[in-house]
Image (spheres, rainbow, N blue to C red):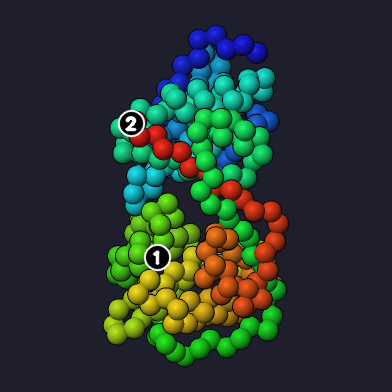
Amino acid sequence: MPPTQIIVRPAEVKDAQEIEHFFRHVRRRYITFGMEDLPQLIREDLVFVAKTGGLIWGVLAVSPKDAGEWGHIRGIGIIDGWQARAGVGLLLYGARSHLRNRGVRALYIILTEEWLHGPLHAHGFVQASRLGTYLRHAHSIPPVPRDPAALRLVRPDDIPQVAQVDRAAFAPLWSYSARELTYLLALGCRMVVAEMDGRIVGYACGEVTGDIGHIARLAVHPDRQGQGIGRQLLLDTMTYLHSVGVTRFSLNTEIDNPQATRLYESLNFRRFGRLIPVLVKDIGEK
């Protein structure tokens, strides 16, 4: 299917239904958002369509990180018959100037789709990290230590402090802003904070999906790491999730973070499934 004159442009809200139909029917697709979120992504001018006439050839969706200059690739789709390397390259090239105008200087993708490996590597994406999934049955949970921190549920006015802890604990690629943390709470995540000397020094967030309790977030300020606060927060979250009926726990973490993996493995979490590469690409001026 040789391309003729394909134009890449920012999507408009009126394109939403056509884009949704496209994603539902193409074979080569990567999507990490619900279609109910598509109109908002379009309004942020970070969904791009490759079209010729009335035909969509490809779609690229990016979410900017509030903290830093990163853009998270949330969706890519290529029409059947279009060579993947050419299609991905055209979408990236066509979106680049728009992304830079929005302050995005680098892109990243948590790559769960095999068909995208070759095209992304061909266009300058490199592996920055790998994510592993850890699982544990929800039984024989050790008691939550009383020390060193005091644990309590988060309050709305805590969110700016929690965001500061998150920013200190994680690299910009992974850090959450106050808005993103508020969104987690709105989705029903149970968030608990750790306090020492009247200051929030860590937090954890757990959520329930069916019979699985997922530890969505665990962070301790670097000044307080190595003191047992992470273990406190993790055990508190596990105890709560078990109390509401989950039978298994899950979490995702960078396997290149030995401090985190040691903590999880010490509490009988075991790695499950394949490692997921995280690819990055600089789109700044050279």
Asked where in the image residue 156 lies, by quadrant, the reply is bottom left
| Real-space Cα separation, disc 1 to disc 2, in angstroms | 29 Å
> Which residue is the site of mark 2?
285
- Toward the top, the furthest residue is 4
The disc placed on residue 5 is none
Quarter of the rendering occupied by the N terminus: top right
Please indicate, yes or no, whether residue 19 appears anywhere in the rendered image. no
Disc 1 packing (10 Å; few <14; some 14–19; many ≥20): many
Residue toward you, 96 or 204 = 96
Asked where in the image residue 165 lies, by quadrant, the reply is bottom left
Where does the image place residue 234, in percent across and percent down from the top left?
A: 53, 76
The disc placed on residue 169 is 1
The residue that appears at 32% across and 65% down in the rendered structure is 164
Relative vertical location of residue 34 with respect to residue 204 in this rendering, above or below:
above
- Contact flag, marks 1 and 2 (Cβ < 8 Å): no
Where does the image place residue 230, in percent across and percent down from the top left?
A: 48, 76
Please indicate, yes or no, whether residue 57 appears anywhere in the rendered image. yes
The residue that appears at 47% across and 82% down in the rendered structure is 228
Q: Amino acid at mark 2?
A: Glu
- Toward the front, the furthest residue is 286
The residue that appears at 55% across and 60% down in the rendered structure is 256
Q: Secondary structure at mark 2?
A: loop
The residue that appears at 50% across and 10% down in the rendered structure is 5
| Left or right, 47 with reference to 258 | left
Residue toward you, 264 or 30 = 264
Q: Amino acid at mark 1?
A: Ala
Q: Nearer the viewer, mark 1 or mark 2?
A: 2
Quarter of the rendering occupied by the C terminus: top left
Where does the image place residue 281, in percent across and percent down from the top left?
A: 46, 38
